[in-house]
Image: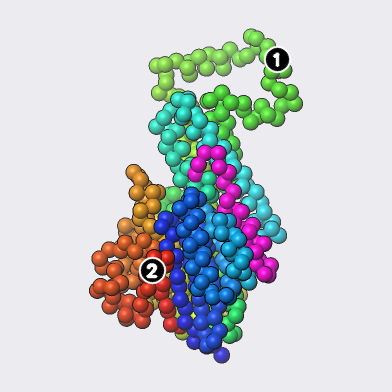
Amino acid sequence: MSQQVSVVIRMYRLNELGDCFLVTFSSGTAKTHLLIDCGSFRNGPASIARLHAIVDAIKTELNGARLDVVVGTHQHNDHVSGFVHCEAAFREIGIGQVWLSWLDDPNDAMARAIGRDHHNLRLQLAAARDTLAGALTRGQASRPVAARSLAVLNDVLGFFGANQAGTPPELPSDGIRILKEIGANAPVYLRPGRTLAMPGLPSQTVRVHVLGPPRRHALLSRKDPRVGESYDHGLASAGLMATRLLEATRRRVGQVSRDEEHYPFNQEYKRTTPGRGSRHLQAAAQRYAKRDEAWRAIDDDWMQQAETLALYLDTFTNNASVVLAIELVESGKVLLFVADAQTGNWLSWKHVTWQRPDVTTNGLLARTVFYKVGHHASHNATLVELFEQLTHSDLAALIPVHKSDPNITKIGGWKMPATNLFKRLVEKTQHRVLQMDDVNPSGCRPNANPAKAAWQRAGIKPRITNLSIELEIKG
């Protein structure tokens, strides 16, 4: 027989883009703690200090207990960097179980293949970024084109902790590696359709249902729901494009081609035979170099491929997010944590085959009373078709977004939260939506109507401190 449970959800305030949620379940005298992600976008002293303050607050909240479960949803800096920067503190706290995506499973052949190609693509893009930066500095690249490509590369590589030239994009994978080592038990790798019990609670009190990430490669790379826009490229072809981009950029600045490195002798030992070249190719090259034909030149078009490749890498990683629907069995209420899942991940939920015959995706969505808004409320990380199924009258939402983040405030910055999405969130939650920075529109300020009355109807009184925003939900 199920027992009643109450849940406290704490969204920690990172002062920049990032996710860190502590979910504490209480049933009778039993209590268990679930941490979903801990990371921030940047790795500077202020960001690391804030992470340490948050982990110290978590330790204080635990009061000598360990974290029963830690979930690392996906390999982005703003979700797992805290496990690197605060590794010693987490080891001191102690972790019972670690839950990770099936994509992190070393025994999964598909995961290994994807991981290898993903790693290579990250390195190739980082190398292209460094070469482009050098070309710009030396005036060897078209400034508008290369500058735009460089900006996109820096933005996306920032999610891997590598938004500075010369920095390898390995920090998130280090975070996952640490999580694999740190738990008292072997990691649990999550696949769609699985249902787990929360440890430390009476049987049938809380069930955790896994919605994502999908097993279909095409859905992992699906970015936007707009008609005619598809990102179903394979990682192998993306890696090839990245290699060609890097080669073109290297040739542009006079560096040795990667192909040259595969020859058995150094370039100075190679002998060319004058006059043996193709007359047709020589004539074409001469025409191409003419000043009045410059408008036909495509040299810099290779650089623009960096934008497509970088956005592909970002989309693939976001769609690799672990998505959890946490069911409070007695009441049937559901807490939905989607990490950074984009369109492909959301679409896959409709096709999940559940282990339990009494579980359906539509049923979980209809009973959702809490939504952790996906990907900091970007335009392509809350799919209309499925979000509209969140119809519970007590629905509340938290957005891990800080609008003073430089990625948002810069010229042409990221639109987070997306205007139309935020408007719909306000409508569906009846104003029960809060941002990490607590800079909420007048209608969403929890201490004034209409939001105050809406929170009261749901039986929730938000608690906001310098370090966290806290909601308690009775189940």
Residue 461 appears left or right of 129: left
Q: Identify whether 116 is placed above or below 179.
A: above
Instruction: Name the residue located 62 percent from the left edge and 26 percent from the top edge.
Output: 256
Quadrant of the snapshot with the C terminus: bottom left
**Viewed as shown, does residue 404 lie left or right of 301?**
left
Give the percent coordinates (x, y) of residue 162: 53, 45
Q: As displayed, is residue 210 above or below residue 394?
A: above
Task: Inspect this view and state whether residue 8 appears.
Answer: yes
Mark 1 neighbour class, 10 Å CA radius: few under 14, some 14 to 19, many 20 or more: few
Quarter holding residue 266: top right
**Residue 86 figure quarter:** bottom right
Residue 465 - label: 2
The amino acid beneath tag 2 is Thr
Camera-side residue of 408 and 387:
408
Pick the residue in front: 362 or 307. 307
Residue 174 in the figure: left or right of residue 289: right
For residue 271, which numbered disc appears in the image?
1
Q: Residue at x 60, y 61 (%)?
A: 88
Q: Position of residue 53 (x, y in %)?
A: 48, 62
Q: Is residue 180 magenta?
A: yes
358 or 144: nearer the eye? 144
CA separation, marks 1 and 2? 71 Å
Residue range corresponding to the magenta coloring: 163-189
Q: Tell me if residue 474 comes above or below residue 284 in the rendering.
A: below
- Check the image and name the residue furthest to the right: 264
Q: Where does the image place residue 429, in percent across and percent down from the top left?
A: 34, 71
Residue 41 visible (yes or no): no
